[in-house]
Amino acid sequence: MTSSNAAERHLRDLARLRRVRDRIDREYARPLDVEALARGVHMSAGHLSREFRRAYGESPYGYLMTRRIERAMTLLRRGDLSVTEVCFEVGCSSLGTFSTRFTELVGVPPSVYRREAARATAGMPPCVAKQVTRPVRGARPVRNREAAVTGPHVA
C-alpha cells in the first residue's frame, strides 16, 4: 500500500469514526453496542474500538457512558426525576451499573449528586452549570462533595 493510499484510508476511517461519535451523541438513550455501531460504518467491532480509542482517547462504550452520565447530571440537577427514572431515561438498563459508572466519573453517587447539585449550581445559567459539571473520564475521583457537584472550575 502506498503512503497516499494509506492516508486516504486513514481519512475515510476518521470520517466513519465521526459518524459513530455523532450517532452516539444523537442516540445515547437507545440501546447501542459496538457491533451495531461497527456494522453501521462497515467496520469490524475490533477495528472500530481500536481506531475510536486512538482518535478520541476512549472506547466507543466509554464515550457512550460519558454522554449518558452528562445527560443524567443535567436531569439530576433539574430535580424532578428519581435516580432510577434518570437511569432509564438516559438509556441504562441496570441501576447498579449506572450508579457505579456515575460515581466513577463524577466522584459521588447519583443520589448525593441529585441532593446537592441544585444548591451548588443555583443561580448559574444552565449552559454554565453544564460546562462546570462536565465529567472528565480518567480524572481522579473528587473527595470533596461540593467540588464534585460544582466541578473543578468553580471556586
Image (cartoon, rainbow, N blue to C red):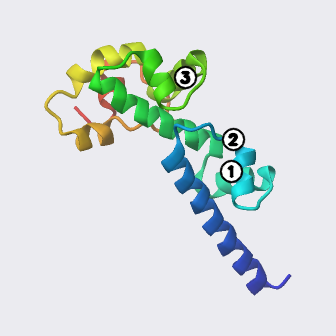
Q: Secondary structure at mark 1?
A: helix
45 left or right of 116 in image: right
- Residues 99 and 91: in front is 91
Could you tell me which residue is drawn at 22 percent across and 28 percent down? 121
Mark 1 and mark 2 in contact? Answer it, CB < 8 Å. yes
Residue of label 1: 37
Taking the image as drawn, is residue 109 in sight? no
> What's the residue type where badge 1 is placed?
Leu
The picture places residue 137, in percent across and down from the top left corner, at 52, 38
Query: Mark 3: which amino acid?
Result: Phe
Is residue 58 in sight in this rendering? yes
Q: CA distance from mark 2 to mark 3?
A: 16 Å
For disc 3, the marked residue is 98
| Residue under the image location 44 percent in, 19 percent down | 85
Disc 3 residue crowd, few under 14, some 14–19, many 20+, Cα 10 Å: many
Residue 35 % position (x, y)? 75, 46
Q: Earlier in the sequence, mark 2 or mark 3?
A: 2
Q: Which residue is drawn at the image coordinates 49% and 49% (left, top)?
A: 26
Question: Up-down: is 97 above or below 34?
Answer: above
- For mark 1, does the 10 Å Cα neighbourhood hold few (<14), some (14 to 19), or many (20 or more) residues? many
* Mark 1 or 3, nearer chain start: 1
* Nearest-to-viewer mark from 1 and 3: 1
Residue 63 sits in quarter: top right
Q: Which mark is residue 33?
A: 2
* Residue 18 vertical placement versus 130 (above, below): below
